[in-house]
């Protein structure tokens, strides 16, 4: 087996083996189009976190999810 | 005398595409001169101020506030427009459609609500995209980051974290992907097939996948990697993972790799990895002239050549129309492109024809536009100088209107070369928009040549879009490369 074969992870195999199931964070039109195609998608009701402070939001994402 | 009326909704967020749709409707109302709904960020305030849309109410808005702004012929029309805007905000359809109105408050609860969720599509403003992508990775999701304006350091951090977890990060600035037959963001409805695509370019993936479909083939997966993945700073992390993943994918027979010319060290590593893959490859480093490829890979200089090579055919068969070369004439060719890689592909063809051409996004061997005296120009309208504060021209075709109108009036222009990109995410009728702009040109104006990147499976329908262009007297070629070649043929000895 060539060395790169071992790098392909199960998670990517899983992504390729069936239509993806999506979490959409952002433009709602993307979720609308996916739903119209019969794709499973959940829209996150996103608004700028940390009162719009991008640096603080970035820091928070590193502490937890 | 015009009236400016503003309303501000404190702490109300709506995404830019949803706001653009409402703005368009309101701007089209009787008595309304201009209208915009925008979040109150400093840059948006500047844009609205320049457009003479702000009063003291709007000027006091903060970044997290939504501004509804109209300039109308009189008070009554302005008030009616604001009422309509408010109504449209209240009646906004659910993102998940009529059958499923539930929205998750957080990414964490979305994952709980959708067992087996495996991919996050992230299109929040760039300042916040890395944070959302990090949350997605830590929830075990692959991430497609559509957002741009993510720092290269954040991109590297995210891709390293993802690689350690065996997850793919597509992007940032990844406009197009097709995974498991599902077109994501700006992608086209193409049949499933045995050709995989790895692309650092959204419109490059779109053109190749659509030409493969036009030639009777199909796509297994198209993996967008983001425009900077093959730069030295990132080292091709996602590209290398995609090569490995497609090596193991039983649905993929052959792979097309499309990118701008990578950093030399990254190119070496990528080509080495391709050489170890059991799949055959077509490599299109658009603009690169010399490639030292492994035995299982072939080079293609254009997107069209890449699609034909992947299909192992010599020509696009079964195309629905033939284009005759219009009378040759002297003058310049002006290319006005929505797709950056489509502009790059045209440059490859002009360069091969030996034409003096300049571009605002030049490939190797082409002059930068600034200060150039080259006769011909190929412009990427998706570049920052055209899109600052405005949607990308693939979402809002009106971005091309001013420069197109000016070009059509220019007596020194012999040929106008255009792309029309359809598919999911794109405007609902870009060809109709172009046709209306072009139909108004006077007799004796330039020859207009276009191509349509898309399929008949797309919501706009490729054939229907082609017919609209032809009805406006536009010559429609079978591909972007064919359109560029036709433009070159048109000027003939006049070059």
Image (tube, coloured by chain):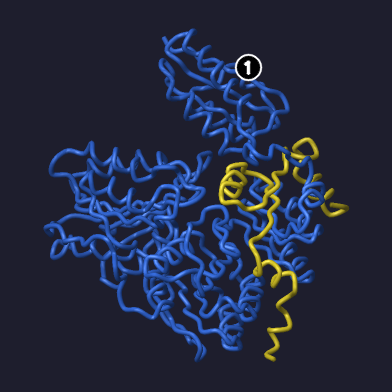
**Chain B tint as drawn:** blue
The reply, left or right, for residue A41 in relation to residue B372 is: right
Quarter of the view holding residue B138: bottom right
The disc numbered 1 marks a residue on which chain? B
Of the pair B374 and B81, the residue shown nearer to us: B81
Note whether B251 is above or below B408 in the view shown: below
Residue B216 in picture, x, y percent from top left: 39, 70
The extreme right residue here reads: A63
Q: Residue at x 19, y 65 (%)?
A: B489
**Image side of residue B320 versus residue B215, left or right:** left
Provide the letter of the chain coloured yellow: A
- In the foreground, B256 or A48: B256
**Whether residue B233 can be seen here:** no
Asked which quadrant contains residue B69, the reply is: top right
Secondary structure of the residue carrying numbered label 1: helix
| Residue B61 % position (x, y) | 67, 24
If the image is split into quadrants, where does the N terminus of chain B sit? top left
Residue found at x 51% / y 56%: B187
Question: Residue B336 in the image: x percent, y percent?
Answer: 35, 51
């Amino acid at each position: 087996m060539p060395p790169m074969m071992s790098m392909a992870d199960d998670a990517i195999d899983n992504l390729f083996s069936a239509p993806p199931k999506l979490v959409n964070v952002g433009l709602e039109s993307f979720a609308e189009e996916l739903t119209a195609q019969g794709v499973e998608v959940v829209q996150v009701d996103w608004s700028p976190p940390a009162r719009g402070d991008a640096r603080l939001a970035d820091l928070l994402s590193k502490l937890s999810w | 005398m015009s009236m400016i009326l503003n309303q501000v909704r404190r702490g109300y967020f709506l995404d830019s595409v949803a706001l653009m749709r409402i703005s368009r409707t309101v701007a089209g109302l009787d008595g309304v001169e201009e209208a915009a709904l925008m979040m109150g960020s400093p840059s948006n305030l500047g844009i609205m101020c320049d457009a003479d849309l702000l009063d003291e109410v709007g000027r006091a808005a903060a970044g997290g506030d939504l501004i509804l702004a109209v300039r109308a012929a009189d008070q009554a029309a302005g008030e009616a427009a604001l009422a309509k805007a408010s109504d449209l905000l209240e009646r906004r359809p659910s993102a998940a459609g009529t059958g499923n109105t539930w929205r998750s408050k957080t990414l964490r609860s979305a994952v709980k609500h959708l067992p087996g969720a495996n991919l996050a599509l992230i299109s929040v403003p760039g300042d916040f995209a890395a944070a959302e992508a990090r949350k997605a990775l830590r929830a075990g999701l692959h991430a497609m980051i559509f957002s741009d304006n993510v720092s290269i350091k954040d991109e590297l951090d995210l891709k390293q974290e993802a690689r350690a977890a065996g997850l793919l990060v597509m992007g940032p600035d990844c406009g197009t992907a097709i995974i498991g037959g599902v077109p994501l963001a700006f992608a086209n409805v193409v049949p499933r097939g045995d050709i995989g695509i790895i692309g650092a370019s959204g419109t490059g993936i779109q053109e190749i996948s659509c030409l493969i479909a036009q030639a009777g083939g199909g796509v297994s997966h198209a993996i967008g990697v983001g425009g900077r993945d093959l730069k030295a700073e990132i080292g091709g992390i996602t590209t290398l993972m995609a090569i490995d993943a497609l090596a193991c994918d039983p649905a993929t027979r052959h792979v097309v790799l499309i990118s701008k010319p990578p950093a030399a060290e990254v190119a070496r590593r990528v080509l080495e990895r391709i050489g170890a893959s059991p799949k055959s490859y077509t490599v299109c480093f658009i603009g690169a002239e010399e490639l030292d490829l492994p035995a299982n890979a072939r080079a293609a200089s254009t997107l069209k050549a890449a699609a034909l090579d992947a299909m192992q055919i010599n020509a696009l068969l079964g195309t629905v129309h033939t284009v005759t070369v219009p009378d040759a004439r002297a003058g310049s060719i002006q290319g006005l492109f929505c797709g950056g890689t489509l502009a790059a592909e045209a440059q490859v063809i002009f360069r091969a024809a030996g034409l003096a051409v300049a571009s605002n996004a030049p490939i190797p061997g082409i002059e930068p536009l600034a200060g150039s005296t080259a006769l011909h120009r190929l412009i990427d309208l998706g570049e920052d100088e055209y899109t600052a504060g405005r949607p990308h021209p693939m979402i809002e075709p009106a971005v091309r209107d001013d420069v197109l109108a000016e070009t059509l009036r220019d007596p020194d222009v012999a040929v106008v070369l255009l792309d029309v990109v359809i598919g999911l995410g794109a405007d609902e009728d870009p060809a109709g928009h172009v046709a209306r702009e072009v139909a108004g040109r006077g007799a004796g104006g330039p020859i207009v040549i276009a191509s349509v990147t898309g399929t008949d499976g797309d919501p706009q329908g490729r054939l229907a879009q082609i017919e609209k262009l032809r009805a406006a007297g536009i010559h429609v070629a079978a591909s972007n490369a064919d359109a560029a070649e036709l433009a070159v043929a048109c000027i003939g000895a006049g070059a």
